[in-house]
Amino acid sequence: MAHGANTTAAHSFGLDTVDEAAPSGVENRPVTAGDLPAVSALHARVFGPGRFARTAYRVREGTPLISPYCRGAFRRGELLAALRMTVVAIGESSPHLMLGPLAVAPEVQGQGFGQALVTEAVAAARSSGIGVIILVGDMPYYGRFGFTPAPRGQFQFPGPVNPARILALEATPGAMAASSGLVRGL
């Protein structure tokens, strides 16, 4: 991993591991309640007010703002990137995760901060018994982490979504076949 990625966490699959000696001075760590104002400000800056109209936000309504899988990249206390991972059910099957949003500050986009956070979160999910990680996003970006287009009709959302943008990653072998239906926050 590059650009200050937390290689210790990626290899140990720990959710609470901090890499204070990252080459770029970046600390990747779980997001805490104290980080939420900075996360919210980053989301507003990157996505604007229209973000709340997206179907993925409807899945997250009423869920905790952070889970043990949410990650942030910080340099000298400044939030550079944040990844939200929401615990969800798919039909009657759980626990699963919905990835997103992934926000990277515009001035550091393309430097690997988002990639490091996704890699760490996927590793943590795999080690903790999560079944499927689902998202609505771009295959060219998320394919590098093992996400593939979800079979059409397998996952339903509580609002309109382009089926071609529904991507999934099987974190536990066999979980995809056992999971179908409405995606809802827990």
Image: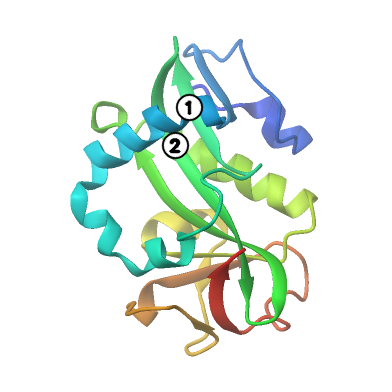
26 above or below 179? above
Compare residues 49 and 122 and report the one nearer the observer. Answer: 49
Disc 2, SS: strand
Query: Which tag is nearer the camera, tag 1 or tag 2?
Result: 1
Where is residue 80, by image quadrant?
top left
Direction bottom: furthest residue: 153
76 above or below 173? above
Give the residue drawn at x 51%, y 45%.
65
The residues bearing labels 1 and 2 have C-alpha atoms spaced at a distance of 10 Å
The residue at which mark 2 appears reads as: 82
Direction left: furthest residue: 49
Give the residue drawn at x 40%, y 24%.
79
Mark 1 and mark 2 residues within 8 Å of each other at the beta carbon: yes
Q: Amino acid at mark 2?
A: Ala
Measured from the top left, where is residue 126 in percent x and y? Answer: 74, 54
Measured from the top left, where is residue 91 in percent x and y? Answer: 63, 82
Give the residue drawn at x 72%, y 66%.
131
Residue 2 seen in render = no
Where is residue 58, by image quadrant?
bottom left
Residue 179 seen in render = yes
Q: Quadrant of the N terminus?
A: top right
The residue at which mark 1 appears reads as: 35
Task: Give the left or right position of residue 109, taking residue 168 as reference.
Answer: left
Q: Amino acid at mark 1?
A: Asp
Numbered mark located on residue 178 in the image: none
